[in-house]
Image (cartoon, helix red, strand yellow):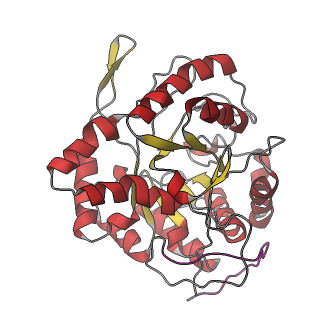
Amino acid sequence: MPLPRRTFLQTAGVLAGGLCLGARHVTPPGSPEYTGQVMTVTGPVAPEELGFCLPHEHLLSRFGTDPAEPSAYDAAAALDTVVPYLQYLRELGVGAVADCTAYSFGRAPELLRRISAASGVRVLTNTGWYAAADDRYVPAEAYSLAAADIARRWTGEFSDGIGDSGIRPGFIKIAVDAGPLSPIDAKLVRAAALTHRATGLTIKAHTGDNATAARQQLEILAEEGIAPGAWTWTHAQNMTDSRPLIEAANRGAWISLDGVKTRYFADGATHGNDTLDRHLAHLMELREAGLLHCVIVSHDGSTFPPAGTVRRPMDILSNTFLPLIRARGFSADEISTLTVTNPARYFTIRRRLLE
């Protein structure tokens, strides 16, 4: 196995195995303060406290608007809108939601903390920079900073809190554009690898139907000595062929089928498209390959988007997709693996290193 090309922030620490294992791991001596826990906006919790978790949603978002960090919200309106919806999800059994709204397009940890406290649903936020959308949300300084310097910024948010909030991220969120990795995409992937080494936070990488970029990202992680189990093929449902997903999962990567949607009626019009067949096809292939333990499922929903943008629901898993897969023969244990066990393991803070 390749050894790390760089050494960065060699914190003591980590990982007992058992996440999504497809590569060998080594456990360095010592243990950082939060290893084995999940970091929420209200503080660390034991993984089993998450319960039914939606691992990829957007409670707050300003995507499509001009970059801004921090982002401004009408807090009262956000609370009035998001809290009742989360309480509804809680009635459906949802115990936790990961907010994937990234730096400069709506990340708002303090407002998320208020939303979590008022709704009774645990919420996670993130660190990292988003390089999809033609790099619109990449800070200008990213082009001149080295990957290690960027990683220090992100690691600082974990050690000291985001801004002055004292709130720590629970995962790393990055994104890449279509095609082979651009230089800035590759730099941010490397920064994420270095941040994982320092913190043990899982990398959630917006990749979509881009098998080439997925393989390139795993190569960069390997160069830094990071196992595939630290990385997530996010929006993997956009692939038309399950074979690259199975290849990545067999190496140990996480596969995120996070765009579960149906057509829905809102603001006097019908919106969205039905993705259930595509999600089901990928899920059945991954199940047949014995890889359900490497899969997470979610909606990529949005409860408080910018004005003029329609909200996307987050109840389709509970009300439609889980009954669908149950009817296709998925057992209660398999459904619990997808909705409870896997997200708990996925967000558990632990470094995943190559031997």
| Residue pictured at 25% horizontal, 48% vertical | 278
Q: Name the spot of residue 107 as percent of width and height, x first.
A: 67, 38
Q: Is residue 28 visible?
A: yes
| Residue pictured at 59% horizontal, 72% vertical | 220
Q: Quadrant of residue 276?
A: top left
Q: Name the spot of residue 66 as percent of width and height, x first.
A: 67, 29
Q: Indicate the quadrant containing the C terminus: top left, top right, bottom left or bottom right.
A: bottom right
Q: Is residue 241 visible?
A: no
**Is residue 8 placed above or below 164 in the rendered structure?**
below
**Is residue 170 placed above or below 62 in the rendered structure?**
below
Magenta-colored stretch includes residue 192: no
In the image, taking residue 222 as reference, residue 295 lies left or right, namely left
Which residues fall within the magenta stretch? Answer: 2-18
In the image, taking residue 52 as reference, residue 103 lies left or right, namely right
- Magenta-drawn stretch, dominant element (helix, strand or loop): loop
| Residue pictured at 50% horizontal, 23% vertical | 84
Q: Name the spot of residue 146 as percent of width and height, x first.
A: 78, 64
In the image, taking residue 171 as reference, residue 333 lies left or right, namely left
Q: Pick the residue in front: 13 or 221.
A: 13
| Residue pictured at 44% horizontal, 73% vertical | 252
**Is residue 70 placed above or below 98 in the rendered structure?**
above
Magenta-colored stretch includes residue 17: yes
Q: Pick the residue in front: 92 or 15.
A: 92
Q: Pick the residue in front: 3 or 215.
A: 3
